[in-house]
Amino acid sequence: MTKSRANPQRPHPPGSPSPGKPDTDPKCPEMPRNVRRIENSNLSHRQQAVLPVMASAPSLAQAARVSGFSERTLRRWLDDDDFRGELTRLRQESAELARLELQGLMLRSVSVLSQAMDDPDKAISLRAARYATSFAVRVCETGKLRKDIQDLEDALALSNAQHSVKQKR
Amino acid sequence: MSALRARVRALQRTLALELAVVRLRRLAGEFCLQSLAVRAGGQPPPQPHAFIHRVVSAGFRLPSFMAVHNYLERCLVKNILPDREDLLSSLIPWSWRYPAPAFWQG
């Protein structure tokens, strides 16, 4: 008796067609969307489906639990260079999204800090002032560091230009 | 963060000459652009000491300030716009060793 590979409890992976409803590309309705995606990539459909889950899960065990694949399978796929590369790319995209979200929250947190600084309780206002000062110092330092690195990049380009001129002579 | 800052300082020491050229060329370019804008607006041109003050504010103490002053005075008398590379070479005469990359030329 062969064991069925289909898992009825496995959640519907994002990006894959829902059961009973073919997912087609609007530009090419006769061709299922996933067929094209698989053709463009070296990853299988199952690997592509599990990628977003793995990119967002905090651990491999949790990714295995959510996706319905075994942890061993995920480990085996992680040995694949294409899979690992795609996962790294997805994780970088997620990190960039999180960074943008945090930047959006910064103004709000500063306004909360300024409200806390007006608190009648001296301990709370002092603590808020201390946080605000240390935060401001760090922001200034980061800005200066960014400017210094930009200058260093320009200096390095200038040094390379000088070397190439010397070589031509 | 402190490790990163230490690494940046080490690189700044290694590329000190190039950094000086980059920063002074930027200051000279800004001054030339300002001179151009002021002339287009029909206002009096910026005085030489304004540029020297900017260079000093950027942390440079150079023995060539008199030469820069003379060059800018000459530009004022002849009523011509100062040139960025001429200004740079009067500030640091050894800057000819460092060619201006194509993307910096305004």
Image (cartoon, rainbow, N blue to C red):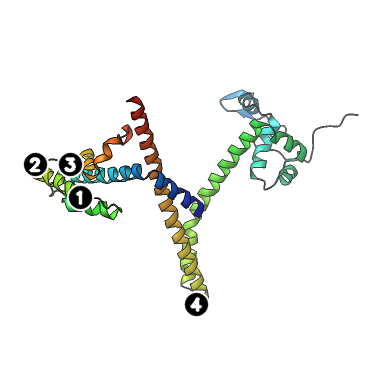
Residue nearest the observer in this picture, A71 or A81: A81
Q: Amino acid at mark 4?
A: Lys
Vertically, is A89 above or below A168? below
Q: Earlier in the sequence, mark 3 or mark 1?
A: 1
Q: Report if the CB atoms under discs 1 and 2 are less than 8 Å apart.
A: no
Return the mark for residue B78: 2
Q: Quadrant of the C terminus of chain A?
A: top left
Front: mark 3 or 1: 1
Q: Amino acid at mark 3?
A: Pro
Give the CA distance from mark 4 to mark 3: 57 Å
Q: Residues within 10 Å of mark 1 (few under 14, many from 20)?
A: some
Q: Amino acid at mark 1?
A: Phe
Q: Earlier in the sequence, mark 1 or mark 2?
A: 1
The residue pinned by badge 1 equals: B65
Picture quadrant where residue B95 is located: top left
Q: Is residue A104 left or right of residue A48?
A: left
Front: mark 4 or 1: 1
Q: Report if the CB atoms under discs 2 and 4 are less than 8 Å apart.
A: no
Give the CA distance from mark 1 to mark 2: 20 Å
Q: Is residue A50 left or right of residue B39?
A: right
Give the CA distance from mark 4 to mark 1: 53 Å
Return the mark for residue B82: 3
Return the mark for residue A122: 4
